Every structure is written in C-alpha cells, then in structure tokens.
Amino acid sequence: MTEKEMLKLSIEEFSRLQNYMLHCEKDSEAYKLMKDRYIELKVILTVSGVNLTDLDKIKE
C-alpha cells in the first residue's frame, strides 16, 4: 500500500469515526472507545502533514 493510499484510508476512517462520535452520548462506553481511535488517527494524520482544521468536527 502506498503512502497516498494509506492517507486516503486514514482520512476516510477519521471522517467516518467522527460521524459516529457525533451521534453517541459522550459518556457512553462506545464513545470512549471511539475517542481512543480518534486520537490515534489525529496523531497519524498530523504527523503525515494533513491539515485537520477543516476535517476535525470533534475538536477535542
């Protein structure tokens, strides 16, 4: 898998995950699990040079 393909998949997963998070109660166990992955993806994308300003809907 090329770096571009990996970035594309990560951005798609980041977007999809945020949509799920926005439809969950913040104090639910599911939200807490999703937040862990959200942070991981945010780090991966930031280190890869992706500007998350417009992509980040959660902003935590």
Image (cartoon, helix red, strand yellow):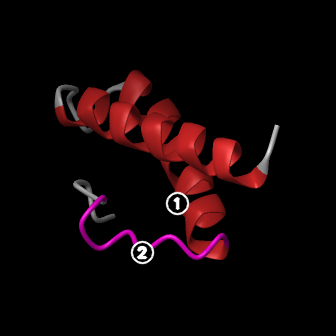
Give 7 or 33, whichever is nearer the viewer.
7
Q: Quadrant of residue 1?
A: top right
Give the residue drawn at x 42%, y 25%: 29
Queried whether the magenta region covers residue 50, the answer comes back as: yes
Q: Which mark is residue 42?
A: 1
Kindly identify the amino acid type of the residue bearing the numbered disc 1. Lys
Q: Are marks 2 and 1 in contact (CB under 8 Å)?
A: no
| Inter-mark Cα distance, 2 to 1 | 10 Å
Kindly identify the amino acid type of the residue bearing the numbered disc 2. Asn
The image position of residue 4, as x and y in percent, is 66, 52
Tell me the crowding category of disc 1: few under 14, some 14 to 19, or many 20 or more residues within 10 angstroms, Cα based: some
User: In the rendered view, would you say 26 is above or below 55?
Assistant: above
Q: What kind of secondary structure does the magenta stretch mostly adopt? A: loop
Residue 24 visible (yes or no): yes
Q: Which mark is residue 51?
A: 2
The image position of residue 28, as x and y in percent, is 32, 26
Q: Quadrant of the C terminus?
A: bottom left
Give 45 or 2, whichever is nearer the viewer.
2
Q: Nearer the viewer, mark 2 or mark 1?
A: 2
